[in-house]
Amino acid sequence: MKKYVLIATLGLMASVMYANDAATAAKKFFDLKGSNDVYSKATMTIIDSNKNQKVREFELFERNNGDTSDTFVRFLAPADVKDTKFLTIGSKTGSDDQRIYLPALKKTRKISSSDKTGKFVGSDLFYYDMESKEFEDFTYKMLNDNAELKESQFKTMSFYVIEQVSKDAESPYSKSITYQNKADNFIYKTEAFDKNGTLWKTMYMLSTKVIDGVIIPTDTLVVNNIEGTKTRIQVGDVKLNTGLNSAIFTIQNLEK
């Protein structure tokens, strides 16, 4: 009997150590060098299950506040979404404050908790996906500490495979599995599962660019495995630390 107790104890110790390893590795991603602010222009291509495409162009303003971040998005084209604006104001204690301005209605709508699984301008990104996330928002479990990916873009990389479970009861996902490159600690692939444990979305960082030591995703693909749809976001004209005016990240600017 003592033998089995000892085996169980050693197994528990190993699992705790592996969990600690997962948290330590995951924190390296959250501790990667960032910038005070970022400006960029992007093209979003939304592909439905019949492979029909919608292309949208927007500019993105982001500001780092230390523990939180704010985001302002303004759509430039096509005409049916032009001047649509989206604002996220980060919160340390709860859900981020999100609002969208709809020019056709000349109205600003606050995104409520029940709307967080709504699709951001018809894409495969939820409003929840647009919120800022911090290290403390998750628990971590190491699934593999030396994995490879079959996708050609990642074949020279070795990955930590880490399961993340959100502490937020309103998260639409039961868990996410991240693939974090051991060389630069950046996450290049994420698998998100629904509450039934079914693989819902897969996100790939197909290409990145390093500017002043900051890793910037320049080509991102989000695959909705349940609905058979995809969203691709390609980013260019990236500028860091330009001293973005704080007035950009206000409701007044949203409605201007």
Image (cartoon, rainbow, N blue to C red):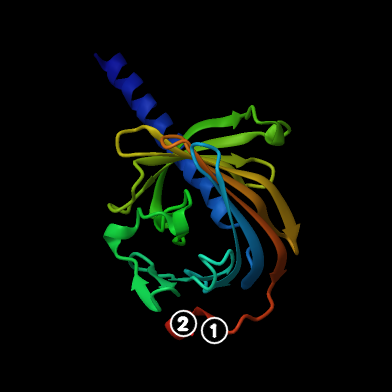
User: Can you tell which of label 1 and label 2 is closer to the viewer?
Assistant: 2
Q: Is residue 156 visible?
A: yes
On the rendered structure, is 216 left or right of 75? right
Q: What residue do we see at 57% from left, 36% from top?
A: 160
- Give the percent coordinates (x, y) of residue 86: 47, 70
Find numbered disc 1 in the image and state the secondary structure of the residue it sits on.
helix
Q: Looking at the image, which is closer to me, 151 or 231?
A: 231
Q: Looking at the image, which is closer to me, 11 or 131?
A: 131
Q: Looking at the image, which is closer to me, 172 or 79?
A: 79
Q: Looking at the image, which is closer to me, 227 or 206?
A: 227
Q: What residue do we see at 54% from left, 55% from top?
A: 30
Q: Which residue is mark 2?
A: 250
Q: Quadrant of residue 187?
A: top right
Numbered tag placed on residue 246 in the rendering: 1
Label 1 Cα neighbours within 10 Å, binned few <14 / some 14-19 / many ≥20: few
Find numbered disc 2 in the image and state the secondary structure of the residue it sits on.
loop
- Give the percent coordinates (x, y) of residue 27: 52, 51
Q: Indicate the amino acid at tag 1.
A: Ser
Question: What is the residue that sits farthest to the left in this orientation?
Answer: 1
Q: Indicate the amino acid at tag 2.
A: Thr
Label 2 Cα neighbours within 10 Å, binned few <14 / some 14-19 / many ≥20: some
Quadrant in which the N terminus appears: top left
**Mark 1–mark 2 distance (CA, rounded to whole Å):** 8 Å
Cβ atoms under marks 1 and 2 closer than 8 Å: yes
Q: What residue do we see at 40% from left, 32% from top?
A: 15
- Give the percent coordinates (x, y) of residue 115: 31, 59
- Give the percent coordinates (x, y) of residue 182: 64, 40
